[in-house]
Amino acid sequence: MSTDAAARRSGLARTVLAVLSWLGPDGLPVDVLAPIADDTTDVERYEALVSDYRRALGDLHPDTLTTAGLARAYLATGHRDAAIRAHEDVLRRRRESFGDGHPFTRGSEWHLAAARSHPPVT
């Protein structure tokens, strides 16, 4: 994988690779870095978990009214729009379940605002 391809997958990848190249002129430790190059595993794991919870417990069960792990995984892998959609979905369902003034709903509003202010990966 090229440095540019790694940077497109993760904003932190370019920095990590730059630090490693500065530490020594030898080849990069591919066997150590290869597992972290695949950024889809966390996203896929969280997507499956959210889907399983919603299927088993229902759309408005309190344990399904969260996207913390999924949204963080989306943001960490440069999928800002997916993180925003996940937060919007939970906010809608929390409003339906708890109402507008509930602390959980207010927390979802804050998380959505934070995701929207997160700089897009370029």
Image (tube, rainbow, N blue to C red):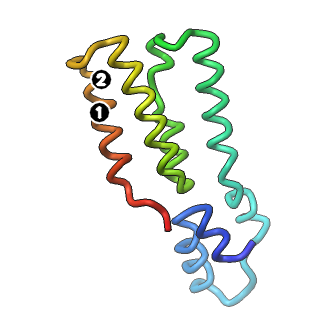
Q: Would you say 61 lies left or right of 106 here?
A: right
Q: Which residue is mark 1?
A: 109
- Element on which disc 2 rests: helix
Residue 76 x, y percent position in the rendering: 52, 53
Query: In which quadrant is the N terminus drawn?
Result: bottom right
Residue found at x 25% / y 21%: 103
Q: Is residue 92 above or below residue 15?
A: above
Seen in the image, is 116 located left or right of residue 86? left
Q: Amino acid at mark 1?
A: Glu
Quick check: marks 2 and 1 in contact, CB under 8 Å?
A: yes
Residue displayed at 32% across by 46% down? 114
Query: Of the residues shown, which amino acid type is indicated by label 2?
Result: Thr
Identify the disc placed on residue 105.
2
Which residue is at the front of the view, 19 or 61?
Answer: 61
Residue 22 rendering spot, x and y as whole percentages: 57, 86
Who is closer to the viewer here, 80 or 77?
80
Q: Residue at x 35, y 39 (%)?
A: 112
Q: Position of residue 101 (x, y in %)?
A: 20, 19
